[in-house]
Image (cartoon, helix red, strand yellow):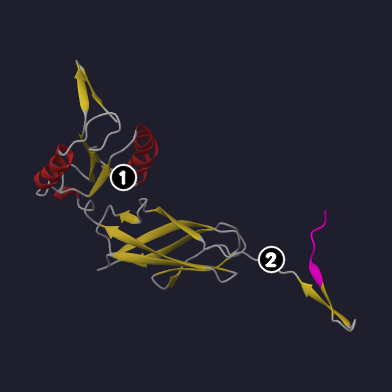
Amino acid sequence: MKKASEVIALVTDVYENTTNQVLKIEKTEANKPVISIEAPAASFDNEIYLESMASDIYIQGKVKDESLIESISIDGVLASFSVTSLNPTFSSQISIANKTKITVTVKDVNGNENVQVFTLNRSGADPASNPMGNTWVVFIENGKYQNFASLEGPAKDVLAMKSALAGYKITKILHKKDMTKYDMEKFFSIELRDHVKNSNIQSLVIWYAGHGKFVSPTGYWFL
């Protein structure tokens, strides 16, 4: 079926005076472009982990949108991309000296604009300062249960561990609470897997506080 390119509006008043007008149909969309940074790798919460203390970095990313892209800039500097391609890849060499964040601005041909801020994390940029490298800690605090008694201890345990680790060079801490079996499986098989892959994690500590049982030689978590 051929799609309509126009509609005709016909109006008649009580005296049977009639007029019509042809209205052209122009299709557009109102969704903002979606921005992702591919190099250096960025985490889910828009944090870029730098591997060196260089004052300039090469940024490469990708934009997803239903329309063509009109402009892409990083901290006001125009990035290179193909204006004739849908979902284009973009790149730019930018200065990050004395910067803690960068801002990526993308506008499509329909005027839809997305401004996204990415934080620069330099904690793992100097390997000599931390022999463990880029180190992440995951706290899983399960205190509320449907089939077991609730626990007050996990919150205190996590707080104590955070205090104990305060003197160590920890790049990032993820704190998860009251995870179900589904939440846990999704976190380990997808979210944490992608963090390890994309954020160049060298050391990972996982601390669980909640109901459990030890059946020699294996320990089990109750969810």
Residue 124: mark in rendering: none
Label 1: which residue?
200
Label 2: which residue?
27
Dominant secondary-structure state across the stretch colored magenta: loop
Picture layout, residue 22 above or below residue 93:
below
Instruction: Decide whether residue 2 is among the magenta residues.
Output: yes
Callout 2 secondary element: loop
**Residue count near mark 2 (Cα–Cα under 10 Å), binned few <14, some 14–19, many ≥20:** few
Task: Looking at the image, tell me whether mark 1 or mark 2 is earlier in sequence order.
Answer: 2
Q: Position of residue 211 (x, y in %)?
A: 21, 29
Q: Where is residue 175, by image quadrant?
A: top left
- The residue positioned 31% from the left and 60% from the top of the image is 119
Q: Label 2 is placed on what type of residue?
A: Lys
**Residue count near mark 1 (Cα–Cα under 10 Å), binned few <14, some 14–19, many ≥20:** some
Q: Position of residue 43 (x, y in %)?
A: 35, 51
**Region rendered in magenta:** 1-8
Q: Residue furthest top?
A: 216
Q: Where is residue 85, by image quadrant?
A: bottom right
